[in-house]
Amino acid sequence: MSEGEEDGQFNEAATADQEQSALRAEKLDGVAKEIESAVAVNAALVELDFNLRVDTTPDGLLVQILDQEERPMFALGSARIDGAIQDLLNIIGMSVADLPYPLVITGHTDAVPFATRANYGNWELSADRANAARRALVSTGVAPERIARVSGVADTVPRNTEVPTAAENRRLTILLHYPEVAEKREMPAEIEGFAGNIPQR
């Protein structure tokens, strides 16, 4: 094979990869808009707009459900899924159920010490909330085998790094992981700290 032929094949492969990436980005943008639109038309959820963030990251589509001081998503010290957070997870689950991408679910807490139960702290609480979210998503039709990782990271990856006790640090993140990125990385950038650098909307 001549050098020119090799260059031609390389260019064709690069073009195909670019087209695939563009189609994937377009599809995920559509999912993001679907989630946001479903929340916007639900009278019971429209006031929770600031509790939800949907962003495209280098790892995939990142959905975050955040606590706000006026609108907490969880009862203090509880991993129970009900009310508004259940409705939000239903919308997210139905929007992503037909996609092929693996999901990475992570629970986060703020830096306030949790000491109301012996041998149970923010590590256990964040993990329990992430696992509760997994169960909720599976109940909406997300295939269990698509769940690639469920973890709790306590307060080690704050969204608001300047105020570790800020309400927005208490959150659930659901990452639709690009498969080829998942194969190359042991840990999503969301867990490594990327999430805290996502622009505020």
Image (spheres, rainbow, N blue to C red):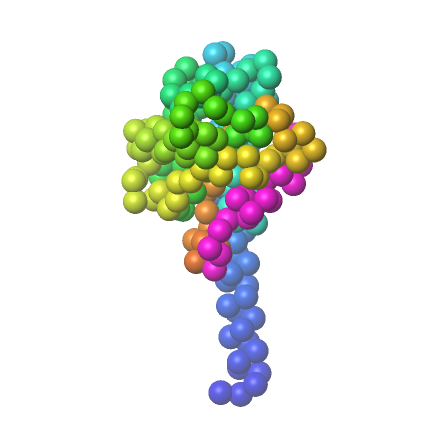
In the picture as drawn, the residue positioned furthest to the right comes out as 162
Which residue lies at the image location 35% right of the left edge and 42% below the top edge?
147
Q: Is residue 137 visible?
A: no
Q: Is 149 in front, or is 113?
A: 113
Residue 200 falls inside the magenta stretch: yes
Which residue lies at the image location 49% right of the left edge and 11% below the top edge?
43
Query: x%, y% of residue 11?
Result: 56, 71
**Image side of residue 11 versus residue 163, left or right:** left
Q: What stretch is highlighted in magenta?
A: 184-201
Residue 183, picture quadrant: bottom left
User: Which corner quadrant holds the C terminus?
Assistant: top right
Query: x%, y% of residue 75?
Result: 46, 17
Residue 188 falls inside the magenta stretch: yes
Q: In this view, does 6 lie above or below 72?
A: below
In the picture as drawn, the residue positioned furthest to the front comes out as 118
Query: x%, y% of residue 94?
Result: 38, 30
Which residue lies at the image location 45% right of the left edge and 20% below the top edge?
116
Which residue lies at the image location 34% right of the left edge and 44% below the top edge?
146
Residue 128, picture quadrant: top left
